[in-house]
Image (cartoon, rainbow, N blue to C red):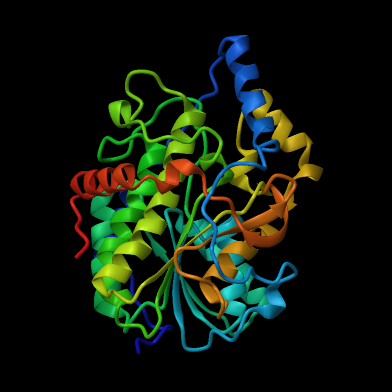
């Protein structure tokens, strides 16, 4: 196994860091009706219909009071957590390291990465955790990063597809020309999983956990006619599309693993509505609601429990979707999340998968 204390920064990584583009989002004045519409959209996350249809898993539900103390020992296991410098990703990386796992935190900002590692080691001094630069908005960065891990790690026991952005007020595009939320939240993780599949298959019981959102059930749809929102940009619709795509991907990955004998356990999770930078960094009325009604939202560590259950629990089920079960799934005890009907359509899922392979230039077996 590679020595975790002597990794040197490869030249591709320094180039990736240097080339990382931080999009500066300017909050320009918008029509009043637009600001109120987005404000209502934020509130709408709290009042999703509890009757949303979905398929059920015909096995026992997780223990509602499952917590960090229930995480089994992860000693000897290796995890990759994207977006692990803050929010749900950071809480997941911290908990995994605390349980004895070796953790790679992958994100764009090296400074934030080092800060996250310092904070994790304050709680777990002997934590085996390190940072690697990865820009999910750049397919070239994903390929170089994956080549590096495939060459330096003995295996990968768990991949947590967590990184994401939420509702930039103006349409911005990735290095490859895709709408940014589609690129980072979904397509980048699709490509990353494909590239790391050989490494995952070297593990005894590998898991891929992909984060979705309750936004997937709130009017989420795959807009094949304008997937990149070039005709008319709607930040919430684009976000919902990306998170619905994540859920569809997680479920289809499990189906294909079963059919093809890949040995991958693919699970989806969502954090409800949690107090993270993703939620708070928003302007207008919706940002005001999120920053000033924080008592309605659960803390980030609580929001990480569905992901940690999916990644570590012995009873976690491939193809399942976990999340909080209280207050319209925005918070509360752990359980099965409702799968929206849009995520169960086989034709749409197959079409999205084929298009994703084409757009990302990657292929699964």
Q: Is residue 135 above or below residue 258?
A: above
Q: Residue at x 24, y 70 (%)?
A: 260
Q: Quadrant of residue 250?
A: bottom left
Q: Specify whether 77 is left or right of 328.
A: left
Q: Nearer the viewer, residue 205 or 318?
A: 318
Looking at the rendered image, the quarter that the C terminus falls into is bottom left
Q: Is residue 233 above or below residue 29?
A: below
Q: From this viewpoint, is residue 363 visible? A: yes
Q: Is residue 337 above or below residue 328?
A: below
Q: Nearer the viewer, residue 149 or 157?
A: 157
Q: Nearer the viewer, residue 157 or 128?
A: 157
Q: From this viewpoint, is residue 20 visible? A: no
Which percent across, then down, holds residue 83? 48, 56
Q: Residue at x 65, y 70 (%)?
A: 62
Looking at the rendered image, the quarter that the N terminus falls into is bottom left
Query: Residue lying furthest right in this view?
Result: 295
Q: Residue at x 51, y 41 (%)?
A: 216
Q: Residue at x 64, y 41 (%)?
A: 51
Which percent across, then down, holds residue 197? 28, 69
Q: Specify whether 287 is left or right of 194.
A: right
Which percent across, then down, holds residue 210? 46, 58
Q: Nearer the viewer, residue 248 or 234?
A: 248
Q: How many marks?
A: 0
């Amino acid at each position: 196994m590679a020595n975790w204390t002597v990794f040197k920064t490869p030249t591709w990584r320094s180039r990736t860091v240097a080339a990382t583009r931080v999009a500066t989002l300017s909050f320009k004045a918008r029509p009043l009706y637009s600001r109120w519409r987005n404000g209502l959209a934020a509130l709408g996350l709290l009042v999703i219909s509890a009757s949303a249809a979905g398929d059920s898993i015909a096995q026992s539900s997780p223990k509602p009071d499952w917590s960090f103390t229930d995480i089994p020992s992860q000693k000897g296991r290796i995890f990759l957590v994207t977006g692990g410098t803050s929010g749900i990703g950071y809480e997941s990386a911290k908990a995994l390291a605390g349980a004895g796992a070796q953790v790679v935190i992958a994100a764009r900002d090296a400074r934030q990465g080092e800060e996250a590692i310092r904070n994790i080691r304050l709680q777990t001094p002997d934590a085996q955790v390190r940072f690697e630069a990865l820009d999910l908005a750049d397919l070239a960065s994903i390929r170089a990063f994956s080549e590096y891990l495939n060459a330096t790690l003995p295996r990968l026991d768990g991949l947590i597809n967590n990184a994401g952005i939420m509702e930039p007020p103006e349409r911005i595009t990735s290095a490859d020309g895709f709408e940014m939320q589609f690129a980072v939240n979904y397509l980048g993780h699709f490509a990353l999983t494909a590239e790391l599949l050989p490494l995952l298959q070297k593990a005894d019981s590998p898991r891929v956990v992909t984060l979705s959102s309750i936004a997937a059930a709130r009017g989420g749809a795959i807009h094949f006619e304008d997937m990149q929102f070039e005709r008319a940009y709607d930040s919430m619709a684009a976000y919902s599309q990306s998170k619905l795509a994540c859920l569809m991907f997680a479920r289809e990955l499990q189906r294909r693993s079963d059919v093809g004998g890949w040995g991958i356990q693919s699970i989806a999770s969502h954090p409800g509505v949690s107090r993270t930078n993703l939620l708070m960094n928003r302007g207008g009325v919706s940002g005001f609601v999120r920053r000033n009604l924080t008592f309605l939202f659960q803390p980030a560590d609580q929001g990480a429990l569905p992901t940690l259950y999916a990644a570590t629990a012995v009873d976690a089920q491939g193809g399942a979707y976990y999340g909080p079960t209280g207050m319209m799934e925005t918070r509360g005890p752990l359980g099965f999340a409702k799968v929206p009907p849009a995520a169960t359509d086989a034709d749409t899922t197959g079409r999205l998968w084929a298009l994703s392979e084409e757009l990302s230039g990657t292929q699964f077996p």
